[in-house]
Amino acid sequence: MPPWLLVVGLGNLPHPNTRHSVGHVIVDVLAAWFSIHRSINRSVGGFKGRSDVLSFSDNIVSLTLFKPKLLMNIAGPSIASALHNTVKLPASMVVVHDSLDHKVKVLSVKLEGSANGHNGVWSVIDTLRANADFYCFRIGIGQDCAVDPANYVLPDMPLDGLLHWNGVSLDRVCHELGRIMSRN
C-alpha cells in the first residue's frame, strides 16, 4: 500500500472563494484535478474524499482531501477526527490555510511550530494537545494595512487569485506534496 497523506483545507463554508477560505479553494482544485469525489462525512464533520493511487513527483501516494464544515476557528475537533480516521500520524497531514504575513500568491511550507497567530491552525494544535507535528501550506494573501483584517479576508478573492491557484501554483502545491511524500 502506498504512503497516505491527508490534505485539509481551512476555510469557512459560508464564505467560499474568499481570501480567508483559500484552503478550501485549493482542496476543491485538487479534487477536480485528480477527479476525487468528496461527500459529506458526518462522523468527521466535513467533506471527505480519497484516491488510492496518485503520483506526485514520482512518488505514489494515497490521498485524502478534507474540508471541515465548521468555521475554521473551531474546526480543530473535526480535523482531529479526520486525522484519526485516516492517516493517524500528524506528520502525514497537511493543513492549507491563508496567511496575511506572506505576499499574495506565495506558498510557504512549514513543518511543526506555532500557529503564528492563525486561529484555525491554533484550533488544530489545541485539539491535538499541543502536537504541531504536521505540515502547513501557508498561502499568502497579503495584507492591506489600511483595512481591518476581517474586512480584508472576507470579500471574494480577486479572479486572478482564483485562477492563479488553478494554474501554475497548483503545480507548486503538487510538487510540495511530492516532496513531503519523499520524506515520509
Image: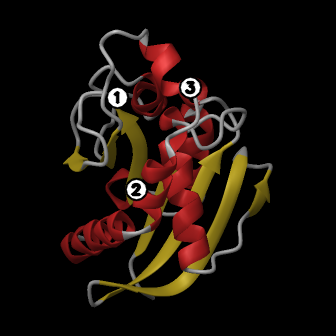
Residue 9 appears in the figure: no
Please tell me which residue lies in front, 28 or 2.
Answer: 28
Residue neighbourhood size for the residue with mark 3, other residues' Cα within 10 Å, grouped as few (<14), some (14–19), many (≥20): some
Amino acid type, residue under disc 3 in the picture: Leu
Numbered circles on residues, count: 3
Judging from the image, what secondary structure is the residue with disc 3 in?
A: loop
Q: Of the residues shown, which amino acid type is indicated by label 1?
A: Ala
Q: Position of residue 9 (x, y in %)?
A: 51, 49
**Which badge, 2 or 1, is on the more N-terminal residue?**
2
- Is residue 37 visible in the rendered image? The answer is yes
Q: Which residue is drawn at the image coordinates 59% and 44% (left, top)?
A: 17
For the point 34% across and 9% down, the residue is: 146
The residue where tag 3 is placed is 154
Q: Earlier in the sequence, mark 1 or mark 3?
A: 1
Task: Report the residue marked by disc 1.
Answer: 130
Query: Is the C-beta separation of discs 2 and 3 under 8 Å?
Result: no
**What crowding class fits label 2: few (fewer than 14 Cα within 10 Å), some (14-19), or many (20 or more)?**
many
Mark 2, residue position: 93
Front of the two marks 1 and 3: 3
**Image coords of residue 62 (percent x, y):** 48, 79
| Label 2: element kind | strand
Instruction: Tell me which numbered mark, 2 or 3, is placed earlier along the sequence.
Output: 2
- Which kind of residue does numbered mark 2 sit on? Met
Q: Label 2, label 1: how many angstroms apart (C-alpha)?
A: 15 Å
- Give the residue at x 49% y 47%: 23
Q: Tell me which residue sits at (66%, 33%) in the image.
A: 15
Q: Position of residue 98 (x, y in %)?
A: 40, 37
Q: Is residue 154 left or right of residue 49?
A: left
